[in-house]
Each structure stands twice: as C-alpha cells, then as structure tokens.
Image (cartoon, helix red, strand yellow):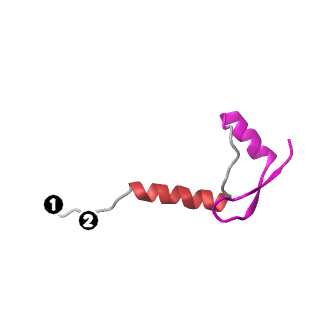
Amino acid sequence: MADIKLKCKDCGAEFVFTEGEQAFYKEKGFENQPTRCADCRRANKAAKNNRGNRSFGPRTGR
C-alpha cells in the first residue's frame, strides 16, 4: 500500500491519504476513501455538533 493523493471536495486542497490511515480505514471496515482534508473534516464535524446544541440562554426559573 502506498500513500494516495486526494483532492478535498470542500476546499479543493490536495491532501495525502497515508498508508497508516488506509490501514485504519480498512480495520474499521470503511470502504470509501475520505473526501475532505483534515481541516474541512474538523470544520464539518464542528458544524454538525453546533447544529444540535441549541442554547436558549440562562435559565430564569420560570
């Protein structure tokens, strides 16, 4: 297995899918290669987490 160069679908940057990452994906049973670079994966994950955490401000006791 060799490192693979991929292109991020969000920002268009080229990133490397290393042998170690490929082995990890295979071990976990993932069949698809990543489509986003590490920065865009983090940003996408943060955006998903923030959508579910709606804050209604401090509780007023009413």
Which residues are drawn in magenta? Answer: 1-30
The verdict on residue 12 being magenta is yes
Give the answer, above or below, for where 26 lies relative to 46: above
Mark 1 is surrounded, within 10 Å at the Cα level, by few (under 14), some (14 to 19) or many (20 or more) other residues, namely few
Q: Please state the horizontal and vertical placement of residue 18, each as a whole percent of the image.
A: 79, 49
11, 15: nearer the viewer = 11
Position of the N terminus, as image quadrant, is top right
Secondary structure at badge 2 equals loop
Say whether residue 13 is left or right of residue 48: right
Residue matched to label 2: 58
Residue at point 76% right, 43% down? 22
Say whether residue 14 is left or right of residue 41: right
Kindly indicate the quadrant of the structure image that contains residue 25: top right
Secondary structure at badge 1 equals loop
Q: CA distance from mark 1 to mark 2?
A: 9 Å
Kindly indicate the quadrant of the structure image that contains residue 53: bottom left
Residue matched to label 1: 61
Q: Amino acid at mark 2?
A: Pro
Q: Amino acid at mark 1?
A: Gly
Q: Please state the horizontal and vertical placement of residue 42, each as a whole percent of the image.
A: 59, 58
Q: Please state the horizontal and vertical placement of residue 23, each as a whole percent of the image.
A: 76, 39
Residue at point 66% right, 56% down? 36
- Farthest left residue in view: 62
